[in-house]
Amino acid sequence: MRLLFCFILASSYCFSQSERQQLLDSLNKARENERGVFKLYIKKPEIEVIGGVFRNRETATQGFEPINFTYNISLPFQFDLNYVNLKAHDKLLKINANLIVHHSKYGNYALGMGARFSFLVIKRTYLSYQGGVVWCEVVKRNTNDGITNMGFCLHHEFSLSHNITKHIKVSVNAVHISNGNLFKGVKNNQDVLGIGIAYQF
């Protein structure tokens, strides 16, 4: 009797496990089209030029004045998220590393590197945030562009971009340089609003 009872118990456990596995497999199969994957790709470099108006946030009462330029040079690799079965479509999330060059009409400039996170909003249109660290140099002192001290600063960039063609995209951008309370001895504080155009080789 005990042997029969153990056999029934073991059989029911095995069959129930099999049913659970079948249910799990069917659920996974039903959601196969939604499965995503992160991949690292080698891509051709991209150069972006952003031209716009700037202000010194410390004395922001003077408003924005022309002209400031920011150049982003994408390194030739990209980490992105996409659906497994839709490899040819727009990427859902793109992560790029960029070299940054930033200067005002006075010649004061910043050089550094940042990481850009781009999220697909609608077809061929991305909302992006780029954060980086730059080294600031003061070429012309006593100017009102917000770059007044030599040293490291944080470089932030918010962007809404649209790919017109495979090689060309346009964007609207908000750029900000500040010490972020990390680099206490450097009091640079600049805002930029600009229009950008990028070309991918």
Image: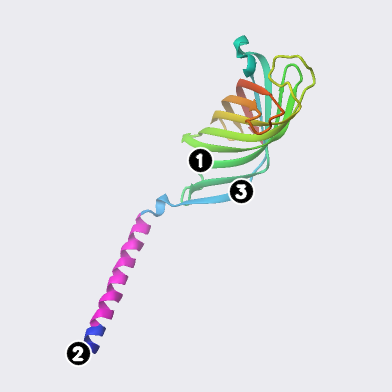
CA–CA distance in space, label 1 to label 3: 14 Å
The image shows residue 51 at horizontal and vertical percentages of: 65, 21
CA–CA distance in space, label 2 to label 3: 64 Å
Q: In which image quadrant can residue 5 be found?
A: bottom left
Which residue is denoted by mark 1 in the rendering? 90
Question: What's the residue at 70%, 14% (across, down)?
Answer: 144
Say which of marks 2 and 3 sits in front: 2
Label 2: element kind: loop
Label 1 packing within 10 angstroms: few (<14), some (14-19), many (20+): some
- For badge 3, the amino acid type reads Tyr
Q: Earlier in the sequence, mark 2 or mark 3?
A: 2
Q: Earlier in the sequence, mark 1 or mark 3?
A: 3
Whether residue 53 is visible, yes or no, is: no
Label 1: element kind: loop
Q: Is residue 54 above or below residue 181?
A: above
The image shows residue 122 at horizontal and vertical percentages of: 45, 33
- For badge 2, the amino acid type reads Met
Which residue is denoted by mark 2 in the rendering? 1
Q: In which image quadrant can residue 30 be found?
A: bottom left
Say which of marks 1 and 2 sits in front: 2
What span is colored magenta in the figure?
8-30
Q: Is residue 77 above or below residue 141?
A: below
Total number of numbered discs in the rendering:
3
Which residue is denoted by mark 3 in the rendering? 41
Question: What's the residue at 56%, 29% (across, down)?
Answer: 158
Check the picture and name the quadrant holding the C terminus. top right
Q: Earlier in the sequence, mark 1 or mark 2?
A: 2
Label 3: element kind: strand
Closer to us: 177 or 114: 177
Q: Is residue 93 above or below residue 199?
A: below
Label 2–label 3 contact, CB within 8 A? no
